[in-house]
Amino acid sequence: QNTALAVALLCLTAIIPVWYIEEVYERFSWGYFETFRKVFDYRNRKLLLSYGADGAQMAVATIFWPIFIFFLFDEKYAAVGFITSLSMVFILALNAWLGHMVDTWGHAKVLKVGTFLEVTGWFMKAFVITPLHVFVTDTYHKFGDSVVRLSKDFASNQPNTPNTCLLYTSPSP
C-alpha cells in the first residue's frame, strides 16, 4: 500500500512541469479534408499500406501475443514476466552489437537481414508450444524488429553519418 501511494505521488509530481508549458497555436497550410486527400493520394499508397501493415503487426505483437503466451504459461504472471524480461535483456545485448553491424554491413544490407528475421520470426511464433520456444522466437523476432526499425530510421534520416546504437559508438573518421 505504501508503494502504491509513493508511485501515485511520483506520478502527480511528474505533472507539475506541464503547468509551466506555454500554449502554442500551430497554423497549418493544409485543411482537414486536404490532409486526408494527400494521405490517400495514389502517390502515397505504398507508404500508407506500409504504415498500416506495420500498425496491424504492432497490434498483434502488443495485444494478442502477450495474451497467447499468458494462456500458454497456464496463466502464471511470474513465468510470463520472467521469459519476456529475459528476452528483453538479450535484445539489449544484441542491440549493442547492432550498431556495429550497421557500420560494417551498411544500412541497406542490415535492413534486408532484419526484414528476413522479422518475417521468419512471425512464422516461428505460429509453432510455439513451450516456454523455451517463446523465449527463442520472441528474442529472434524482436531483434529482427529492432534491426528493421533502426536501419529504416538510419537510412531515412542520416545516410552519410556513422551510426550510434545504445552502447556501441562508431569510431570517428
Image (spheres, helix red, strand yellow):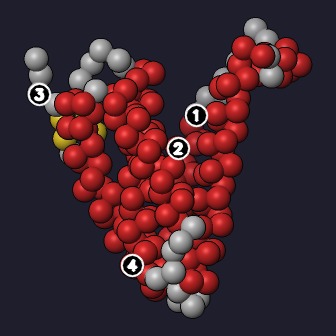
Q: Is 142 above or below relative to 148? A: below
Q: At 37% across and 26% down in the image, what residue appears?
A: 108
Q: Are marks 1 and 4 in contact (CB under 8 Å)?
A: no
Residue type beneath disc 2: Pro
Q: Which mark is residue 132?
A: 4
**Whole-percent x and y of residue 25?**
71, 20
Of labels 1 and 4, the one closer to you: 4
Provide the residue designation for mark 2.
17
Residue type beneath disc 3: Pro
> Mark 4 falls on what kind of element?
helix
Q: Earlier in the sequence, mark 1 or mark 4?
A: 1
In the rendered image, which quarter contains the C terminus? top left
Mark 4, Cα crowd under 10 Å, few <14 / some 14-19 / many 20+, is: few
Judge from the rendering whether residue 28 lies leftward or rightward of residue 70; answer left or right: right
Q: At 58% across and 34% down in the image, what residue appears?
A: 21
> Mark 3 falls on what kind of element?
loop
Provide the residue designation for mark 1.
21
Q: Which mark is residue 171?
A: 3
**Whole-percent x and y of residue 10?**
49, 64
Q: At 29% across and 48% down in the image, what residue appears?
A: 95
Q: Which mark is residue 145?
A: none
Q: Nearer the viewer, residue 34 or 99?
A: 99
Residue type beneath disc 4: Leu
Residue type beneath disc 1: Ile
Q: Is residue 4 visible?
A: no
Of labels 3 and 1, the one closer to you: 3
